[in-house]
Structure formats: structure tokens, C-alpha cells
Image: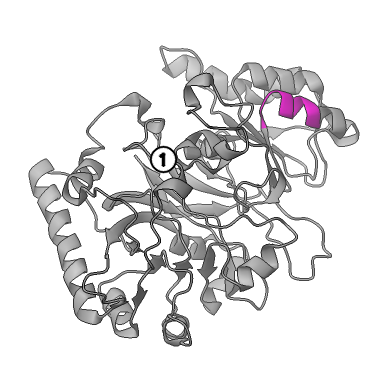
Amino acid sequence: MLQFTIFDLARGQATPDTLQKDCEQNAVSIALVPIDTVVSLGTASSGALEAFIGPCSVIEMFEENNKNVIDADEMKAALAGLSKEIERVKREYSESVEAPTKLLIKTRDTKTSSTVSSSVLKAASSSDASTSDASFSAPSPRSSPSSSRTSQNARHLSPAALAVIVEHGITLVGVDSTELDPADSKDNVEYARKNKLPCLINLELSEVESGFQYILVAPPMVMKDRDLVAVRPILLMN
Amino acid sequence: MLDYSNIIDISIPPSDNGASGRVTTCTYFGLEARLTEADLEPGDSFESVEARTDLDNLKLNSHIGVAMVFELNLADSAVVDAEAVRSAMKPWLDKVAMFGSGPAILPERILFKTANNGSHPQLSADAVLYLSAEGTALIGVESATIGGEDSESIELLLREHDIVRLTNLDLSKAKPMTPYFLSAVPLLANYKGEVPTRAVLIAIKED
């Protein structure tokens, strides 16, 4: 009971001396903490932490036809697919699965042989598989990060895709790109700030398979007058 | 089941001025002490193994998991020996013994809260050894050190027994002898030593 497989989603090799700089240059994983949330986190009110801790989905949106921006239609289709999958698992396993309100989007295809559908199933059915040693068995053989990683670029969301995510009821979005926006743009960051959407940026998702029964634990380090702060995000799988 | 609507922030976040001093930190000393031969793959060195993502569990399982807060009564002495720790835990152990058929179970992560605010418990070496024998993987306190005046030797003892130290906590909102799910992940990945952490307790609800 309460045994989880731990996925460390943190990127970067910061030391205490370089953290500030690494944070500003997106060399480590960072959290965008909307200003209201910063204020309440600073007053040690726990309410704001709920934004960064709770049930979480991971979806894969890999590049096809050199389309490196995720537009509203593609986002809608992906979220519809996720909802359908959750419904299916609910039906087949008669489980009470709540649709998570936190969403991590994996855009770098780092696996050579990807088995998406079976991995979703595995993540979904893991709660009834009473393997007591589950906390120590990795879901698939994971090799050292440097050897398996391909150099495929991460994709970026369009502000319209972000709007679709918010409309879907998602209250936190995380991405594996180094920045929330493509180069020379600040549209997504501006959108997230304006709509008070907490974001996690520069996540290491290469070892995480798609699924919707994860638990995200990513309480950020809050700094005064700063909304992009360091975080060591962790994903737990039952 | 975790109750996400009931999350307690037990950390003191670093302030921008950096001058106020009190920051919640935890220790991380790498995988070396934890590795068994079975974990090693051909070509692994003790340095390269830290970057292996499939060892995340081994790396962080002391920092994440079920924890319990115990209240210390420091009226008599600031030094907390094994006997004082035992008596702080006794009501819980008695309760478990009464309801459970199995052995009295202590969570692997133990947080000490002091009844009268402002006093700082100094765990003695035999208290650390007692906790280690009980399977403790993490010890957390509200003060800046665990060992007080003796903190250097206590520090060595904690490392020797692979126990994570969590200091400068704010446990004012945490209930003693109630199981919580603790997350106190070191902020920096793969950095060894003392690192800031945003420590939280998540309430556990019965199914």
C-alpha cells in the first residue's frame, strides 16, 4: 500500500551556486507559478500547493509531417483520445477513474519501438495487479539516458492549443521542451500568466509512458517577485 | 489513498534576500551506499550510475513515502536519547500492537515536533542507532541540526546508516501520530550534500 514507482522528471545538473543562472537560462526544470499562487504559496497557505500535486495524465504528441507546432485541432483530438481511453478503462475494469486535471505532454519521441496502447493499458490496470514489489520494478527496461536518446526536437504548443487545454478543465500543463514558447515568442508564457495556468517546463519525460493514473508531486521553490522558479518534479505510479 | 485537498506545507521557503537564514533542507549522498551488485550493469561506475533513470526509486525512496510526526517533550532536557524517542513513540506502538496482529509498524520516515516552541531537540547517538535499527530512512526536525552541539558526529552517524536528514521544518500544522505521505525531494538532481527542499505532507484517507 502506498508503494510507488518514482520517475524523476528533473533536467539539468545544477549546483547551489549555478541554480539561479541555470533557472534563468532554462538549463534546469522550471515551474511557472502564476502570481496569485506565488503570493499564497509565500504565506504558507497550503491551498496553492494543490495546483502542483495530484492525479496526472501523460500524453504523447509526436511530430508528424514536420509539423513542429501543436495547434488547437491536434490538441482537441489528443484530449478527446485521452477522454475516450479513460472511459474505456472505466467500462472494462469498472474502476472509478477520475480524469486528472494535470497534463504532461511528451513531444520528443525517444523510444525506437513504442507500444502506446499497451502501455496505457498497463498503467491503467496496474492498480489491480497486486505486485507487492511494484515499487522497485521499472515498467520497462530503461537504459542509460545518453545512449537511447535521439536528437529529435521537442515541439511547442500554440496559444490556441493552450486555450483548448484550459477549456478541457486542465489546471496544470507540463512540457518536455526547453521553453514553453518557440524562439522569439512569449505568447504561451503570456497566456499562462494571464489565465493563471501553472506550467512545468523542461521536463524529462523520455522514460515515462503515456497513461492517466500517475500522481504528480512538483511543489516549486517560491522566490519573491519571480514567477519562473526551480522545481524538482516527481511522477509516481502505483 | 492520498487526500490531495489536504496538503500541508512543512517547509520554510528560501527568501530572496537570503539573509533570514532558515531554509528547509535535506541531505542526499548518492547511491553508493545503496547499490547492490544486482543493480550494476556492465560499464557502470559509481559516477555514471547516478545518471541512470531506472534507479530513481533507489535514489529517492527515502525522501518520498509514508511518514509520521512524533511530539517530543523537552521539559527536562534538550538531549533526546533512545529512551526519550521510545517513549515519544510508545503511544503509537501500543496502538498498533492493540489493533494489528503483526509486528508494530513504524513508518520509515520520522519527523520530530517539539511541544514547546523554540526548544531544539538534540538527538543522541543512541537515539539515531535506535531509529536506524527500527528501519528509519529519514529523520526530520524543526531545528537547523539534528545533533545540536554534537551535530558533526551525529552527521557522520546518519551517513553511515544511510539516513536522510531533513531540517528547518515547520510542523506546526502537522498532527502527531497520524500517517502522512511525505515528499521532501532535494531540489537539485544528482547533487550530493545539503540541498533546499520544498517538503510537503499529503494526508492519507482510509478507503
Q: Is residue A77 left or right of residue A145?
A: left
Q: Which residue is mark 1?
A: A143
Q: Secondary structure at mark 1?
A: loop
- Where on the picture, by quarter, is residue A39? bottom right
Q: In the rendered image of this protein, does residue B10 appear above or below residue A19?
A: above
Q: In the rendered image of this protein, does residue A216 appear above or below residue A226?
A: above
Task: Classify the position of the N terminus of chain B by image quarter.
Answer: top left
| Residue B33 pos. (x, y %) | 64, 26
Does residue B84 appear in this view?
no
| Residue A214 pos. (x, y %) | 34, 49
| Residue B170 pos. (x, y %) | 68, 50
Magenta segment: does it hold B156? yes
- Which residue does the image show at 75% across and 21% down from the upper left? B127
Q: Which residues are magenta?
A: B155-163
Give the farthest residue toward the right: B149
Residue type indicated by callout 1? Ser
